[in-house]
Image (tube, helix red, strand yellow):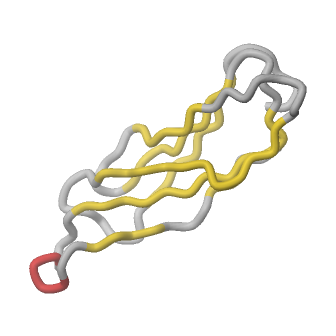
Amino acid sequence: MWTGQGPREARQAVSFADRYLQPPAVMVSISMWDLDRRSNTRADNSAENVTADGFDLVFRTWGDTRVARIRADWTALGPVRDEARLGPRLMPQPRWYMPS
């Protein structure tokens, strides 16, 4: 991501610790980034292919943006098997690091 030009993408498969009853809502955010100050900051961080078992965490950049490293956090919210007894479950998960 540092030396490239044009569209670039990093993708990481994420598996949930517990299976949801249906695909949950997944929110992703950038929690750290190290970018070259001499180029524009362009970033698209998203969850794709969300299922009850997991999703793909995707980071994209384009143009002349130079990314040294980036860290993304995510949270999934949805019904699980024991929800009637335990109430809704929010499952924050480990962070994902994009290799340089």
Side (left or right) of 33 relative to 12: right
Q: Tally the marks.
A: 0
Q: Residue 68 at x, y = what percent? A: 84, 41
Residue in view at x 52 percent, y 45 percent: 57
Instruction: Say whether residue 75 is left or right of residue 53.
Output: right
Name of the residue lying farthest toward the left: 84
x and y percentages locating residue 2 in the rendered image? 85, 31
Residue at the image point whose x is 26% and y is 51% from the top: 23
Q: Residue furthest bottom?
A: 85
Quarter of the view holding residue 11: top right
Query: Going 72% across and 29% down the picture, which residue do you hit?
Result: 41
Q: Position of residue 64 (x, y in %)?
A: 80, 18
**The quarter of the displayed image where residue 10 is located:** top right
Q: Is residue 29 left or right of residue 91?
A: right
* Residue at the image point whose x is 39% and y is 70% from the top: 91
In this view, 64 is above or below 25: above
Image quadrant in which you'd find residue 59: top right
Position of the C terminus, as image quadrant, is top right
